[in-house]
Amino acid sequence: MIQFPNDFVWGSATSSYQIEGAAAEGGRAWSIWDAHAHIPGRTHNNENGNVACDHYHRYKEDVKLMADLGLKAYRFSISWSRIQPDGQGEINQEGIDFYSNLIDELLKHNITPWITLYHWDLPLALQTEKDGWLNPDIADFFATYAEICFKHFGDRVKNWITLNEPWVVAILGYGEGVFAPGRKSKDEPYLAAHQLLRSHGKAVKVYREKYQEKQGGKIGITNNCDWREPLTNKPEDIEAAERSLLFFLGWFADPIYFGDYPKVMRDRVGDRLPKFSAEDVENIKGSSDFFGLNHYTASYAADVDPNANDDDVTVYGNGGIFEDQYVDLTSDPKWKMTTMNWAIVPWGCRKLLEWISDRYGNPPTYITENGCSLDDKLENGEVKDTIRKEFVEGYLAACKKAIDNGVNLQGYFVWSFMDNFEWALGYSKRFGIHYVDYETLERTPKNSALWFKEAIKNNGFEFSLNERDI
C-alpha cells in the first residue's frame, strides 16, 4: 500500500477556453484562441471552443461530479476577456459573477479552488492593438487584470497561479506558430518569454504588497517540462540532457530562483536573449511561493554536432529553437505511447522532481497537470481506460518515491477533469477522466475516475505495477 502525507492535495484541472464555451455570451469578447480557431486549417476539422463542454452553463453539474469524485482541489483558469473584454479597460460584471458563483459552488462542496490567471487565451484586442506578449506594456496590463481577480475573488481563493506553461506560449505561439497567435520566428520566443516573466513578476508584486497579508493566500507560476535522460554515459550526452532541461524549464525557473536566465542560454543565444532590468530582477527573483509543474513524458537526449545535417535529428520537444541547443531527442521503442505519441515513463517524473529539488532548493512543489490522451470509447455506459488508470497509478507511485527521497511534493492534479477542446488538435484527443459526448455533452466517469476516487478516499492505493518503472 502506497500512502501519501495526510495533507496531500488531490486535485484535477481544466482551462477556460477548453471547457467553458459561451464564447460570445455574458459579455465575453474574443481571445486570440477564438480568432486562431476560426482561421481555416489551424485546428483539427476546423473545430473551436464556441461550445466546448458548455461548462459556463453546466458548472453546477460539473462541481457535483467533482464532489462525487471526492476531489480536494480544483484548478481552473479565468478567461481574461470574460473579465476585461479588451484586456485593458472596463470590468465585465457578468464575468465576475460567473467565476464568483463557481468559486462559491466549489466551496459549498468543500473543494478548494486553485485559480490560473492566464492559460493562453489573451484578449484579442491586446494582440491586434498592442502586439500581445511582445509589448513590454503587457506586464502592466496583466498586473491590472490580476489585481481585479485578487480584489474580487481573493477573499475566498487562497491559491493563485499567474501563468500556465509560458514555454508553450513562447514556443508554440511565437516560434512554431501552431498555437495562437500563430507566429513563426527564431527570435520572438525569447522576446515573448521575457514579457511573460515580467508580467508574472508584476502581478506577484501587486498581490504581495496589497493582498497577500490580508487574504492569507499563496501565489506562484506553473511551468511544464519533460524529463531528459542522457542517451549514453558519455559526458557530452549528459551535458546535452542538462542543456535541454535548462532550455526548457530553467528558461523560466532560473529567473524566479536565481534572478537570470541559465548561463548556457546566455552563452548560446547571446544578444537575442533579452536582459532583465534591476526592477525586473527585484520583481521576479523569489516571486513564487511554490513550484508548479506540468509533466507528461520523457525522452532520451544526445549531443549533436553543430555541423550535422538537421534532417538527421529529432527536434520535436526542443521547440524549434534547435540551432540554439543541438540536442537530439529519441524514445525507447519499448515505451508505451499515448495517442499524443508521448511516451509513458513514470521514472522520468521522479527524476525530474528530484532535479527540481536539487537545483532550486527543494521548494514546496505541486504537480498541477499530469495525465494522458487515449482513444477512449463509451460502451454500455462504461469507459474501460485501463492504460490511463495505470498511467496515473505509475506516475503517482513515482511521486511517492520522490517524496520518500526527500522531495517536498505537496499535491497532484490529474489532467484533465473531463475531455475537452485540445487546442490545435480540436476534439480529436481525450485527456479526461470523465468522458464527454460532444453531441449531447453528457459526462460519464471513466474507470480511471473511479480508481482515482478510491485513491483519494484512501489517501493512497495498492501499487500493482513493476517497482522498476518508478
Image (spheres, rainbow, N blue to C red):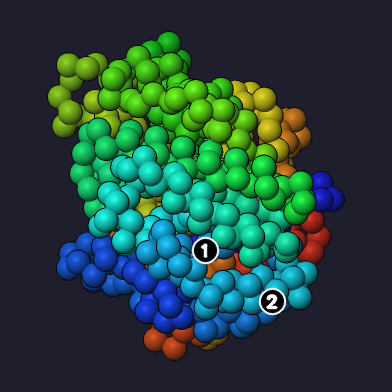
Mark 1–mark 2 distance (CA, rounded to whole Å): 16 Å
* Residue 176 horizontal/vertical position (percent): 25, 44
Query: Residue 343: which quarter of the image?
Result: top left
Identify whether 417 is placed above or below 130. Answer: below
Amino acid marked by disc 1: Ile
Camera-side residue of 288 and 464: 288
Residue sticking out furthest to the right: 6
**Tag 1's secondary structure?**
loop
Camera-side residue of 320 and 215: 215
* Residue that appears at 63% across and 72% down: 100
Residue sticking out furthest to the front: 90
Q: Which mark is residue 301?
A: none
Q: Check disc 2 and report the residue beneath it.
A: 105
Residue 95 falls left or right of residue 269:
right
Q: Check disc 1 and report the residue beneath it.
A: 78
Considering the image in quadrants, where does the C terminus appear?
Answer: top right
* Residue 67 horizontal/vertical position (percent): 71, 74
Residue sticking out furthest to the bottom: 440
| Residue 218 visible to the viewer | yes
Query: Residue 193: which quarter of the image?
Result: top left
* Residue that appears at 22% across and 62% down: 42
Q: Are marks 1 and 2 in contact (CB under 8 Å)?
A: no
Amino acid marked by disc 2: Glu
Q: Residues within 10 Å of mark 1 (few under 14, many from 20)?
A: many
Q: Residues within 10 Å of mark 2 (few under 14, many from 20)?
A: some
Camera-side residue of 343 and 62: 62
* Residue that appears at 44% across and 88% down: 440
Question: Which mark is first along the chain, 2 or 1?
Answer: 1
